[in-house]
Amino acid sequence: MMMLWAVVLTQTVLIIGLAIALYLRQRRGQQQLQKLQKQLTTLISTTEKNNNLGHEIKELRSGIIGVGQRVINFESELTEQQQQLQHLTDKQQSLELADPEAKIYSRAMKMVELGAGLEEIIQECELPRAEAELLLRLHQTKSG
């Protein structure tokens, strides 16, 4: 009979040990499951952020390409305007050289700007009095 109690007691201890082992294993499994769920949540969040950043990068690239295109167009227009300005400057210089009267008026205006008097302008530039007076009045209108 003693032996029977020893066998029963041994089996009971084994059953309790197995139950404890199963309980601990289940608990460890739940902890691992919770850990995996947290990692999954983090992964999903990171993936969403990554997708958003990818979208923002695409938008920035598009914007940069647009700005680059506008800069290229602006440079092209600027080059055209510089060429036109150079052409007009060359044309103006050639007209000034071709027209001696333009030189005289140009010199007279310079003298007016420097503060020369009516008589001085008439003598130096050989302009009629009426024209010299007109230049003086024009200068006074501009500066006044």
Image (spheres, rainbow, N blue to C red):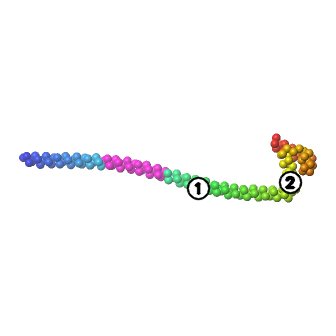
Report the residue at 43% width, 49% height from top. 45
Percent coordinates x, y for residue 48 in the rendering = 45, 50
The quadrant of the rendering that contains the C terminus is: top right
- Spot the residue most to the top: 144
Main secondary-structure element of the magenta-colored stretch: helix
User: Can you give x and y, in whole percent of width and height, for residue 70 in the image?
Assistant: 63, 55
Q: Give the range drawn in magenta.
A: 30-52
- Image mark for residue 65: 1
**In the visual, does 88 lie left or right of 45?**
right
Instruction: First in sequence, mark 2 or 1: give its number.
Output: 1
What residue is drawn where x is 86% and y is 54%?
103
Disc number lying in front (2 or 1): 2
Q: Distance between the residues labelled 2 and 1?
A: 51 Å
Q: How crowded is mark 1: few (under 14 residues within 10 Å), some or many (20 or more)?
A: few
Task: Tell me which amino acid carries mark 1.
Answer: Ile
Is residue 11 left or right of 130 when viewed as pictured?
A: left
Task: Give the percent coordinates (x, y) of residue 5.
Answer: 10, 46
For badge 2, the amino acid type reads Lys
Q: Does the magenta segment cover residue 112?
A: no
| Label 2: element kind | helix
Q: Name the residue under label 2.
A: 103
Label 1: which secondary element: helix
Q: In this view, does 60 lie to the left or right of 120?
A: left
Q: Are marks 2 and 1 in contact (CB under 8 Å)?
A: no
Q: Can see residue 33?
A: yes
